Amino acid sequence: MPVRQRQEVQAVPRQAGLIAPDDESYWAQIAAQYDVSPSFLNLENGYFGVQARPVFEAFQRYERTVNRDNSFFLRREWPGRHAHVLKRLAAFAGVDEGELLITRNLMESLNIILQGYPWRAGDEVVCASHDYDEVAETLEMVAQRRGLRVARVEVPLNPSGDDEIVAVYEGALSEHTRAILITHMVHRTGQIMPVARLSALARSRGVDTIVDAAHSFAQLDFRLPDLGADFVGANLHKWLGAPLGVGLLYVKRERLGEIAPLFGSMAHADGGIARLGNVGTVPPAPVLAIEDALDFHESIGSASKEARLRYLTQYWVARVRGLPGLRMLTPSDPQRSCAIAVFAIDGLPAQQVCDRLLEEYGIFTVVRPVAGTHGVRVTPHLYITPSDLDRLVAALQAMTRETQ
């Protein structure tokens, strides 16, 4: 019996060329494709992304199909459908499907690499204090088990350029350095790290790079090979807008044989990437909806999406950056960040600011630790409008007046 074809839904016509980030008529059409709560303004979209309506409706159809067709679907249709989604995702990411694994999230992806990497006792791993907390905890666990040394660097919050960042990492390399862990887009501040340059530096020293692309994947316009790294993990439930429960792991083909499986099995002993993902039965619907999320994303275009998200961030940041007592903890150069920006108000604890924004203004944000202090992180999405951000600006203007 042939595999049934997916029902494709295209809510907004695909656009040719770059869409102006301030074309509010077009972006209103995109915003209308999201069903969000009317009870608060959600400016904490960095945790996970709201699925656009066509993606969510497809996800619900897949759930019904799997529940209705039961084991027939899993045994007869799922292998082919999974392979098709993987091929489509690999094409979008710019890699071969034999180098890509669909995982449950970034943490599963990086656990596979960090725990399966061929470490030797005495190896050194360079990372930054701004790296994701759970990734850092996993690295510490592996370091204790395998006798590794973890060397942490401090990256400036507002660097003068890439050279300053590269110099920080270069100064941390030693004869014992085996790998550098790099966060492409820092979840605390939104800073975009020069991963390609850092990868080139590492390669020139015989050092590997392991990249956390949790926030950058489908927020920035790039392909995985552009990073120059042999190992990359990412989430698909953040900026791609796929359902919760899907991520990816990229391992360059010639490195696959070096990684020991985290989930043991002899079923895939051929050295292919499938042996790294033997987790048993997984929910098919989130995986199937990856293709619908790609459809929606590509109808806008990666470059246009990145430009719009950066425009929205700079819209509110430009209006509050000069407020007395308000400090931006995100780089001042707009090209060094995109949808994520973080601020602090002198004299007001970040959690108090966060709570007041919600209780008094109906604006939901989150507190993030940044360089020994705490800031309030703001992450708009494609359904956010400039008028929404005017509400945030007005709230911050009122709060800063109180502190003077």
Image: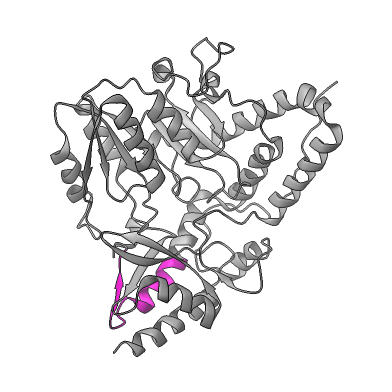
Q: Is residue 175 above or below residue 285?
A: above
Left or right, 364 with respect to 184, comes to right
Residue at left offset 36%, top offset 52%:
186
Instruction: State the image coordinates of residue 241 (x, y, percent, origin top left).
Output: 59, 50
Residue at left offset 45%, top offset 45%:
214
Instruction: State the image coordinates of residue 126 (x, y, percent, origin top left).
Output: 24, 37
Left or right, 72 with respect to 373, comes to right
Q: Is residue 207 above or below residue 382?
A: above
Q: Quadrant of residue 77?
A: top right
Q: Which residues are magenta?
A: 312-329
Q: Quadrant of residue 349?
A: bottom left
Residue at left offset 52%, top offset 9%:
270
Q: Looking at the image, which is closer to me, 115 or 77? A: 115
Instruction: State the image coordinates of residue 136 (x, y, percent, origin top left).
Output: 35, 42
Q: Looking at the figure, which quarter contains the C terminus? A: bottom left
Instruction: State the image coordinates of residue 103 (x, y, percent, origin top left).
Output: 55, 34
